[in-house]
Image (tube, helix red, strand yellow):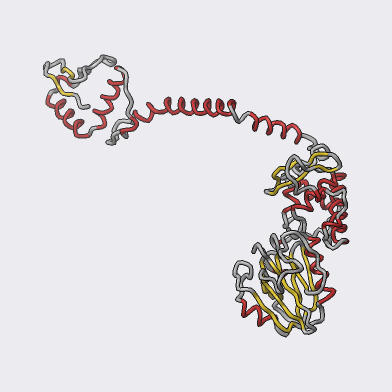
């Protein structure tokens, strides 16, 4: 994936070969996924007749300043690349154009011919790039949202330290955050952390000033070296983990030391456990995490079973309370809340049902008014009643119980 060194190499190639020349012809691909927010015909009309004044870069973004706006802006994505016919521009993986390919490539998204015959093309085989036409590229996303450029705007140690103290996230994830620092992608992050001997999962907030200074130094050295060789990976130092990071797990080594692969910041991450170790209280945290992962088998199932049992027990205890509603409400309990009651519970349930049935309450009250002698003679509490009848002790007449 093109990162700061690759985009900087493209910028320098344009600066050295194209500035001061007028665009004679432009061909924009009909690909709305890549050509963002403007039709190909409008894009072409905005370029033809314009003169290239300068080429700018911030992070992994490039834009060309013409003698008048709007200006073409390039977000390289996974496989975006700048090619100038007859000029050696850096080649990197996934660039999709070989020396023997047709020109312009079938993957070309923007092609321009200059007034001296020089031809330039922006290609993207995987179609994750974005090409835009903007009046002021630095004032709108994505460029307006970028953090300081890792090459052009290096942070001071104190500033870097204060920024990290506020970030409770793995350092690898933070380095990939373009709003924090722009230009660092996956391979540069792995390289600088390896060179600094820092574990990719080390919390940013745990860094000392000394470790901050070491990391800044490695960021500067790795980026400057990559730019020095024009992002030609074949010329990267042999001591870099870069050369082994795409090997298969178990077969990747550097200086005889094993390279492991984990996911950090959402990206596959190469590091050397023997040299890049977690420090401080993160050691115990990682061990606990690993223990928990190991226990996800039988012990994990037991824990889940115990938790489920506790929840079931709590539900059973709460269930009778939901059944016994206060008197005076004319609502019957939902069918699913009914349970098999004991003899004592049946008395309570019958009393609740009698109380909850408004029509039967009226009948009972009328009956009691007619039989005034029975109004003060109540059935003793706790006496069990029949499932079918309740006897009035004054007139000995059976009375049906409402269920």
Quadrant where the N terminus lies? bottom right
Pick the front one: 160 or 56: 56
Residue at screen point 59% across, 70% down: 32
Left/right of residue 63 with respect to residue 363 in the rendered view: right
State the image quarter where residue 152 is shown. bottom right
Task: Give coordinates of residue 45: x percent, y percent.
Answer: 66, 82
Pick the front one: 342 or 193: 193
Residue at screen point 15% across, 27% down: 369
Task: Give coordinates of residue 216: x percent, y percent.
Answer: 85, 51
Residue at screen point 81% across, 50% down: 243
Left/right of residue 393 with respect to residue 15 in the rendered view: left
Q: Is residue 228 above or below residue 35?
A: above
The reply to whether residue 77 is in sight is: yes
Q: Is residue 259 above or below residue 225?
A: above
The reply to whether residue 147 is in sight is: no
Pick the front one: 361 or 298: 298
Figure label count: 0
Task: Give coordinates of residue 124: x percent, y percent.
Answer: 68, 66
Left/right of residue 281 with respect to residue 30 in the rendered view: right
Task: Give coordinates of residue 245: x percent, y percent.
Answer: 77, 48
Quadrant where the C terminus lies? top left
């Amino acid at each position: 994936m093109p990162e700061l060194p690759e985009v900087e190499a493209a910028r320098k190639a344009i600066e050295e070969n194209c500035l001061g020349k007028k665009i004679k012809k432009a061909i924009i691909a009909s690909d709305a996924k890549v050509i963002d927010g403007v039709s190909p015909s409008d894009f072409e009309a905005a370029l033809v007749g314009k003169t290239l004044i300068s080429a700018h870069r911030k992070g992994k973004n490039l834009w060309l300043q013409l003698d008048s706006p709007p200006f073409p802006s390039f977000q390289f994505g996974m496989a975006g690349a700048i090619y100038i016919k007859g000029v050696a521009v850096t080649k990197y993986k996934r660039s999709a154009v070989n020396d023997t390919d047709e020109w312009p490539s079938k993957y070309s998204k923007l092609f321009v011919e200059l007034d001296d015959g020089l031809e330039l093309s922006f290609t993207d085989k995987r179609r994750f790039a974005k090409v835009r036409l903007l009046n002021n590229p630095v004032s709108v996303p994505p460029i307006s949202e970028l953090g300081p450029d890792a090459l052009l705007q290096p942070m001071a140690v104190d500033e870097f330290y204060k920024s990290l103290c506020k970030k409770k996230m793995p350092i690898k994830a933070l380095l990939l955050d373009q709003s924090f620092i722009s230009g660092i992608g996956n391979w540069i992050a792995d390289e600088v952390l390896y060179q600094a001997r820092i574990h990719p999962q080390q919390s940013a907030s745990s860094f000392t000033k000394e470790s901050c200074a070491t990391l800044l130094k490695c960021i500067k050295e790795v980026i400057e070296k990559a730019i020095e060789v024009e992002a030609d990976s074949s010329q990267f130092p042999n001591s870099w983990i870069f050369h082994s990071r795409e090997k298969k797990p178990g077969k990747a080594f550097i200086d005889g030391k094993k390279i492991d692969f984990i996911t950090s910041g959402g990206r596959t991450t190469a590091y050397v456990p023997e040299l890049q170790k977690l420090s401080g209280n993160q050691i115990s945290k990682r061990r606990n995490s690993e223990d928990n992962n190991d226990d996800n088998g039988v012990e994990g199932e037991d824990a889940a079973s115990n938790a489920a049992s506790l929840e079931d027990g709590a539900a059973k205890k709460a269930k009778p309370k939901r059944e016994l509603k206060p008197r005076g409400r004319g609502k019957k309990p939902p069918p699913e809340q009914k349970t098999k009651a004991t003899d004592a519970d049946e008395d309570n349930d019958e009393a609740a049902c009698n109380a909850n049935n408004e029509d039967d309450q009226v009948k009972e009250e009328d009956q009691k008014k007619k039989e005034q002698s029975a109004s003060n003679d109540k059935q003793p509490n706790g006496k069990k009643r029949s499932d079918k009848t309740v006897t009035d002790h004054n007139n000995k007449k059976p009375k049906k119980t409402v269920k």
